[in-house]
């Protein structure tokens, strides 16, 4: 009798799906794209300029947000739920989106809405707009994160000629910079009641540097020209991605790692951690063309096979 392989009692590994939202240029316009495990799907038909900005998975539902520039030159914020598209806002104003988060069956989308010629920081909850700033001041909402019943939004406001980094918790604002130099918060993450925010702040040398704020206390991630664009906290380890000089970067508890090859202009837009695997998406300039890429544990894979430029803007693993 032939010997059979014994069951070692270990569960089979669970296959994870890796989603990346972004865009890819066609002949004339940007096409909103969603890549699943490296296979791309067009969310728009390429007849109008469009892009996918963020992706989120919740209760077997896949949410993607982005925007499309309509023929009347009005930008319209879009939400795709399981591939079915709708407008984020019923407003006819110029709108743009930056992120999506689903919590307790509520869909939160951040972005901006142009009201009376002023760009207003806005968060939409199930399509209902909550303006975080007024038409007396320019503002922007760049990211949203929910923890328990609390809603956190990252962004900025303008004070004179300077942008001030700001976060909102349930609508109440806290400034993270003092207005001496322009600054903004690009992303926010909450873990164990600690609030982490990342972004950039200008310096006296007239270039911006990457910064991390934990509960309002700032840490400089780089003294070179740089920016921090996204953050993920897992097992007391803080992962931040962005750029430094021309390189895509990953900072792990403040320790920098260059993701891109020397000489290639590159940018990290989003980071997601699943177990021991660290995913970063962005772009890398390869042979003169910006290509949407994903780095898994530092190893890059090109997502787009188009000869035109493309970018990966957000990664989510489920």
Image (cartoon, rainbow, N blue to C red):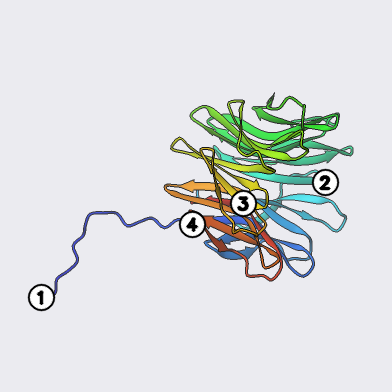
Q: Is residue 130 visible?
A: no
- Mark 1 is surrounded, within 10 Å at the Cα level, by few (under 14), some (14 to 19) or many (20 or more) other residues, namely few
271 with respect to 65 (left or right): left
Which residue is found at the position 62% from the left and 32% from the top? 152
Between disc 4 and disc 2, the foreground one is 4
Which residue is found at the position 78% from the left and 64% from the top? 29
The picture places residue 249, in percent across and down from the top left corner, at 59, 48
What whole-number distance in Å separates the C-alpha atoms at marks 3 and 2? Answer: 31 Å
What whole-number distance in Å separates the C-alpha atoms at marks 1 and 3? Answer: 57 Å
49 with respect to 276 (left or right): right
Question: Which secondary structure, mark 2?
Answer: loop
Going from the N terminus, do you reach mark 1 or mark 3 first?
Answer: 1
What whole-number distance in Å separates the C-alpha atoms at marks 4 and 3? Answer: 23 Å
The residue labelled by disc 1 is 1
Q: Which mark is residue 17?
A: 4
Foreground residue, 143 or 308?
Answer: 308
Between disc 3 and disc 2, the foreground one is 3
The residue labelled by disc 2 is 94
**Residue 293's quadrant in the figure?**
bottom right
The picture places residue 287, in percent across and down from the top left corner, at 67, 68
57 with respect to 115 (left or right): left
Going from the N terminus, do you reach mark 4 or mark 1 first?
Answer: 1
Going from the N terminus, do you reach mark 4 or mark 3 first?
Answer: 4
The residue labelled by disc 3 is 248
Question: Which secondary structure, mark 3?
Answer: strand
Question: Which secondary structure, mark 1?
Answer: loop
Going from the N terminus, do you reach mark 4 or mark 2 first?
Answer: 4
- Mark 2 is surrounded, within 10 Å at the Cα level, by few (under 14), some (14 to 19) or many (20 or more) other residues, namely some
């Amino acid at each position: 009798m032939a010997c059979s392989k014994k069951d070692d009692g270990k569960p089979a590994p669970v296959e994870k799906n890796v989603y990346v939202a972004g865009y890819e240029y066609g002949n004339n316009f940007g096409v909103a794209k969603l890549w699943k495990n490296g296979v791309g799907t067009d969310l728009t038909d390429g007849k109008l300029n469009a892009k996918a900005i963020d992706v989120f998975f919740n209760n077997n539902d896949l949410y993607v947000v982005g925007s499309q520039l309509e023929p009347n030159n009005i930008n319209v914020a879009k939400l795709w739920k399981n591939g079915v598209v709708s407008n984020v806002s019923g407003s006819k104003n110029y709108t743009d989106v930056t992120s999506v988060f689903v919590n307790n069956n509520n869909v939160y989308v951040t972005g901006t809405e142009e009201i009376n010629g002023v760009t207003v920081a806005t968060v939409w909850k199930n399509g209902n707009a909550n303006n975080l700033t007024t038409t007396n001041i320019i503002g922007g909402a760049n990211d949203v994160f929910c923890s328990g019943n609390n809603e956190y939004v990252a962004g900025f406001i303008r004070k004179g000629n300077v942008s001030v980094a700001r976060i909102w918790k349930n609508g109440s604002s806290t400034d993270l910079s003092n207005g001496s130099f322009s600054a903004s918060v690009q992303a926010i993450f909450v873990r164990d009641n600690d609030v982490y925010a990342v972004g950039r702040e200008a310096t006296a040398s007239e270039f911006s540097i990457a910064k991390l704020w934990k509960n309002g206390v700032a840490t400089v991630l780089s003294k070179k020209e740089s920016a921090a664009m996204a953050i993920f906290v897992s097992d007391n380890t803080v992962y931040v991605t962005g750029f430094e000089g021309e390189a895509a970067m990953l900072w792990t508890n403040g320790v920098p790692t260059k993701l891109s090859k020397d000489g290639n202009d590159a940018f990290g837009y989003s980071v997601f951690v699943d177990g021991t695997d660290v995913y970063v998406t962005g772009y890398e300039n390869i042979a003169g063309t910006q290509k949407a890429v994903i780095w898994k544990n530092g190893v890059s894979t090109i997502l787009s096979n188009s000869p035109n430029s493309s970018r990966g803007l957000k990664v989510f693993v489920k």
